[in-house]
Image (cartoon, rainbow, N blue to C red):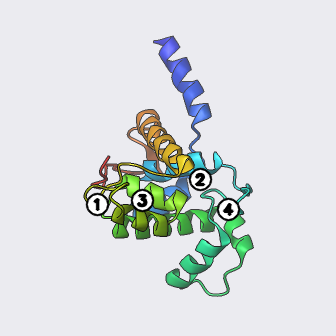
Amino acid sequence: MVAVLCVKSIARYCYPLKYSTYIAKYAKQYDLDPYFVMAVIKTESNFKENVRSNKNAIGLMQITPDTAEWAADKMGVSNFQDNMLNDPEFNVRMGCWYLNNLKSEFNNNMDLILAAYNGGRGNVQKWLKDSEHSKDGKNIQYIPFKETDKYIKRVKVNYRVYRYLYKNLQINTSTIIVNFYNFKF
């Protein structure tokens, strides 16, 4: 029993529950599973708020300035500036909005949502139309970007770990009731 508790404590250290207030707030607002949002943040930035990728993606959810400008316009955010992406709350809000936008476009299909988040929605749309990548135009059998393929697998593993480590999660005295929100694995 003690060994299990130690392992779980170490795992929780490796899988932090940071920014949970923002995650809970915006996951609920944008109809997302909070564990899914945590898994994306873990994969994208490992919960480091001031990180910038070699592709110029910024913040916890690693949003590129081009995507952020487009999203800010759609969200009705006036006077958007790239440095706003360094603010954890704004970054989580925009990332959740974007995931929800992709969720609507790709009919709750988690693989497609993640492929679009990482590899670009335009690429996913092309792959779905190409019989080399999709047999039915609704699912992708082969992802030509190795980074995107690995990304999807990492997020899904992180998702399962977060669900296991933090089941019955409570934030601000409200229980977050988590389900798969019809995500298709």
Look at discs 4 and 1 and give the one toward the viewer.
1
Task: Tell me the residue at 62%/87% (across/down).
Answer: 78
Q: Eyeballing the image, is 174 above or below 63?
A: above
Between discs 4 and 3, the one toward the N terminus:
4
**Label 2 close to label 3 by CB (< 8 Å):** no
**Label 4 close to label 2 by CB (< 8 Å):** no
Answer with the quarter of the image where residue 166 lies: top left
Residue 26 at x, y percent in the picture: 48, 64
Residue 172 in view of the camera: no
Task: Tell me the residue at 37%/53% (across/down).
Answer: 110
Residue 102 in view of the camera: yes
User: Quick one: label 2, few (<14), some, or many (20+) residues within 10 Å?
Assistant: some
Residue on which the image places disc 2? 19
Under circle 1, the secondary element is loop
Between discs 2 and 3, the one toward the N terminus:
2
Look at discs 2 and 3 and give the one toward the viewer.
3
Look at discs 1 and 2 and give the one toward the viewer.
1
Q: CA distance from mark 2 to mark 3?
A: 22 Å
**Label 4 close to label 3 by CB (< 8 Å):** no
Residue on which the image places disc 3? 113
Residue 8 placement, left or right of 49: left
Q: CA distance from mark 1 to mark 2?
A: 34 Å
Q: What amino acid is at disc 3?
A: Ile
Q: Eyeballing the image, is 104 above or below 185?
A: below
Task: Tell me the residue at 46%/33% (across/down).
Answer: 165
Residue 57: give its label: 4
Foreground residue among 119 and 35: 119
Residue on which the image places disc 1? 138
Q: What amino acid is at disc 2?
A: Tyr
Q: CA distance from mark 4 to mark 2?
A: 19 Å
